[in-house]
Image (spheres, helix red, strand yellow):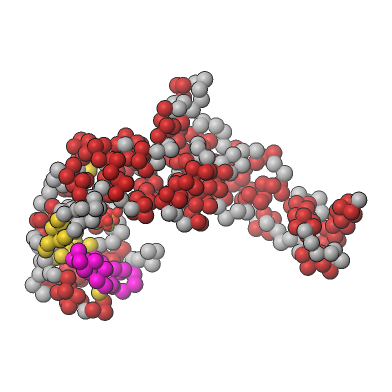
């Protein structure tokens, strides 16, 4: 992802339209990339829609430069030079029969207009002709997407109830798009989401997790999860969290709002969080156990699960930072996820209207030169062996005690460290 160059991506996507046209086919940029460009956002990737059949696309660009990633659905990936990435070329199609509530049973190749109609939301149903006479290209809008972009509305194409019934994932996508662009869900689209929310279970856990990831990392994440609650999707996806909406944060001061409102504020205060951090913020008012349960449900990696759990477990750990012995604080400060833990602490402090001195203090300590923040240890196990300490369980304790003393500056040299070892060994044998 990171080695993509937006200019190269665009050029490559342009060259694909050009080649298809030169071969006599119809071809446009389609969907997300058109929407993003119109919103003034950098498209993540480009999709091309065409009346060329998948086999014609492969023939035109060559077998070696193409991947039949979804040939049954008419999708061929055309592989460009590294910084340009891959462009998906999709044959105009109509989808039919959604017996699993997620995927079409059949697709039929059709016209551009019908292809626009099978897409999920009006703002995703736009085509763009980058080769049009007009210097800036031409938008082709069969579904009223331009109006909805202007009005900032997420509206299902056609009857929202029928469209969500076909593919339940669309409900989650709608919430994610509303949060990402700060748009509202059109009334009928919102109502249909509410009516069909319970059926979102037809979507695979991995795909749900992927949407949740997208929805929790955007800046509108608090609105996104509140929309999930409002539509009833939260009841199905994260039923453990819905009771928070009825619980006061501080029973003696109901006017301070509910735990849910507080949780939303914490989420909102995060700045470009990783998914595990956002997940930790979402669940921190419950228990780390809940994060494990959610992670298992969504089949997250151990790495992400452990990080999210650790963050929830350590949500109070830095509060006494200024009063902690340095050797204890230091061990927290050198953990790889310290910046995420600090971000969580800062967001919690902000949301609960508390002081952030502990956060500032830790950030200040983190600016220490590396050799001071985390000096090389004075002694290792080899040193203990050479010093004549019989190997065993004691080693860990001795090395830890020496490390604490080194960090707290009660010992400064190897000799002092070995003297401490002698004292501790003697005490141990008493
Ligand atoms: P993102 O920024 O998340 O990539 P996107 O709109 O590009 O947004 P993609 O999943 O890349 O989303 O899909 C590309 C296009 O395919 C969409 O813009 C939309 O037109 C269509 N599409 C994607 N998923 C669906 C779906 N579940 N139902 C109908 N159309 C869909
Ligand atoms: Mg996309």
Numbered label tally: 0
| Residue located at (51% from left, 31% from top) | 352
Percent across and percent down for residue 271 are 44, 46
Image height of 226 relative to 29, above or below: above
**Is residue 268 one of those drawn in magenta?**
no
Q: Which residues are magenta?
A: 67-89
Residue at the far top: name it. Answer: 252
Residue at the far front: name it. Answer: 99
Which quarter of the figure is the N terminus placed in? bottom left
Percent across and percent down for residue 361 are 62, 42
Percent across and percent down for residue 255 are 45, 21
**Is residue 72 one of those drawn in magenta?**
yes
| 110 or 81, nearer to the observer | 110
| 336 or 128, nearer to the observer | 336
| Residue located at (25% from left, 40% from top) | 196
| Residue located at (47% from left, 41% from top) | 283
Q: Is residue 359 left or right of residue 56?
A: right
Ligand 1 image-quadrant field: bottom left
Q: Is residue 416 visible?
A: no
Quarter of the figure with residue 156: top left
| Residue located at (56% from left, 48% from top) | 310
| 53 or 328, nearer to the observer | 53
Percent across and percent down for residue 98 are 19, 53
| 77 or 133, nearer to the observer | 77
Q: Is residue 256 visible?
A: yes
């Amino acid at each position: 992802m990171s080695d993509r160059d937006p200019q190269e991506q665009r050029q490559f996507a342009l060259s694909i339209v050009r080649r298809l046209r030169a071969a006599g086919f119809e071809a446009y940029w389609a969907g997300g990339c058109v929407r993003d460009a119109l919103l003034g956002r950098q498209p993540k990737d480009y999709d091309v829609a065409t009346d060329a059949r998948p086999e014609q696309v492969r023939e035109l660009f060559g077998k070696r430069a193409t991947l039949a990633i979804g040939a049954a659905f008419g999708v061929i990936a055309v592989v460009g030079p590294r910084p340009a990435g891959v462009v998906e070329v999709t044959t105009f199609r109509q989808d039919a029969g959604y017996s699993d509530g997620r995927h079409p049973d059949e697709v039929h190749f059709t016209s551009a207009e019908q292809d626009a109609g099978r897409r999920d939301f009006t703002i995703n149903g736009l085509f763009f002709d980058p080769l049009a006479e007009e210097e800036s290209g031409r938008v082709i809008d069969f579904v009223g997407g331009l109006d909805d972009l202007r009005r900032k509305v997420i509206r299902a194409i056609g009857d929202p109830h029928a469209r969500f019934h076909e593919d339940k994932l669309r409900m989650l996508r709608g919430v994610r798009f509303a949060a990402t662009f700060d748009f509202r869900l059109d009334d009928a689209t919102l109502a249909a989401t509410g009516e069909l929310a319970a059926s979102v279970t037809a979507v695979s856990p991995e795909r749900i997790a992927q949407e949740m990831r997208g929805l929790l990392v955007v800046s509108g994440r608090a609105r996104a999860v509140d929309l999930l609650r409002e539509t009833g999707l939260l009841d199905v996806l994260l039923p453990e969290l819905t009771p928070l909406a009825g619980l006061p944060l501080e029973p003696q001061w109901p006017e301070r709002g509910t735990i849910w409102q507080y949780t939303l504020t914490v989420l909102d205060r995060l700045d470009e969080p990783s998914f595990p951090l956002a997940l930790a913020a979402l669940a921190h008012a419950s228990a780390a156990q809940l994060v494990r349960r959610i992670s298992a449900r969504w089949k997250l990696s151990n790495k992400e699960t452990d990080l999210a759990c650790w963050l929830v477990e350590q949500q109070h750990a830095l509060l006494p930072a200024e009063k902690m012995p340095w050797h204890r604080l230091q061990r927290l400060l050198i953990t790889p996820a310290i910046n995420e833990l600090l971000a969580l602490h800062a967001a919690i402090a902000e949301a609960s209207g508390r002081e952030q001195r502990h956060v500032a203090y830790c950030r200040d300590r983190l600016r220490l030169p590396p050799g001071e923040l985390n000096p090389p240890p004075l002694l290792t196990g080899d040193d203990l062996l050479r010093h004549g300490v019989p190997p065993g369980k004691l080693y860990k304790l001795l090395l830890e005690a020496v490390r604490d003393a080194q960090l707290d500056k009660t010992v400064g040299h190897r000799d002092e460290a070995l003297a401490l070892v002698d004292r501790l060994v003697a005490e141990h044998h008493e």
